Image (cartoon, rainbow, N blue to C red):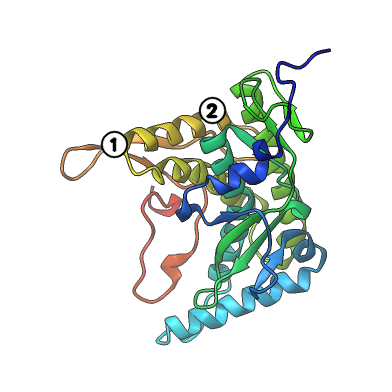
Amino acid sequence: MSHPHTLASPADGLRASLSRMPEDARLRADVPASEPDWVRCGDLLGEPARLVRWRERLTGWLAETYSEAPVIPERTPASWILSWYLHVPALAGAMLLHHERRVPSLAPSALAFRIGADRPHPDSVAVLGDGFHCLPTDPGSAHPRAVVVPDERALAAVLRGRYVAHASRFIDVYGPLTRLGRRQLWAAATDALDNALWSAGRLGGTPEAEGAGVADAALVLEARFPPLTSASKLTLTSGTDGRREWTRNREGCCYNYLLPAESECGGCPRVR
């Protein structure tokens, strides 16, 4: 069967997509040998003790930041690591879908992230594979590693399936290391994906770009797809100045309110 593009160019591959990402997305195509603190997701999930050490490092950082706290409640760092880790596959998938209409591999072996030196969160993400799913109109659809799907809804389903597969693997490893219930774990996974799709649009810096991100969230999370806990929660509300703005109610709690002088986040399920 003939392909509409006769010549595939390496320039049409996933590395080209990553080179076009907004700088603020902090997405790249490799792990720099010269930079410490990069972690490959597959290595982390293969050695759960490293997840425990990461959480302990965060607990120490929180203890320094909130020095007036007699103790850091276990649920807070446990929840932050949960959300931070899930942000990695969510961000990689959301950014490439939004800006390029491509979905990369989101397998643990295909992703890595750098843990920040000051605050121990993922401050950069690397997408290491070069295969991707795309639309028939994609200029790179003839690339040897491209898989063409018929339409945007099919592309959204690929993203959702790949994200859920990675989240499932992580939750199977991380869940037994925490006292967080399974509903809380999957609520955080849902929040991470919905937020990442919204953020991909907001990085554009205009109301139109933000609206396009909201539309992507509605496309990927058009309904509840178990084990995810809800459809997209993005809604338009009137701000304090009367202007309409996008907001979302969270599915899960980050337990930030357990820290001194902190309160529940906007949209927290505890205050609804």
What label does residue 26 carry, if any? none
Depth order, front residue of 15/161: 15
Q: Quadrant of the N terminus?
A: top right
As rendered, which of 151 and 62 lies closer to the eye?
Answer: 151
| Kind of residue at badge 1 | Thr
**Residue at 54% of width from left, 33% of height from top?**
231
Total label count?
A: 2
Q: Quadrant of residue 207?
A: top left
Occupied quadrant, residue 30:
bottom right
Residue 31 image-quadrant placement: bottom right
- Vertical arrangement, residue 153 with respect to residue 242, above or below: above
Q: Tell me where residue 230 appears, x and y as whole percent.
A: 55, 37
Amino acid residing under circle 2: Leu
Residue lying at 61% horizontally and 21% vertically, measured from the top left:
137
**Which sits in the foreground, 208 or 61?**
208
* Residue 199 place in picture, x, y as percent: 45, 46
Considering the numbered disc 1 on the image, is that residue within a helix, a strand or a loop?
strand
Q: Secondary structure at mark 2?
A: helix
Q: Position of residue 240 (x, y in %)?
A: 18, 45
Q: Which mark is residue 237?
A: 1
Which of marks 2 and 1 precedes in the sequence? Answer: 2
Q: Residue at x 78, y 59 (%)?
A: 42
Q: Is residue 116 among the parts visible in the rendering?
A: yes
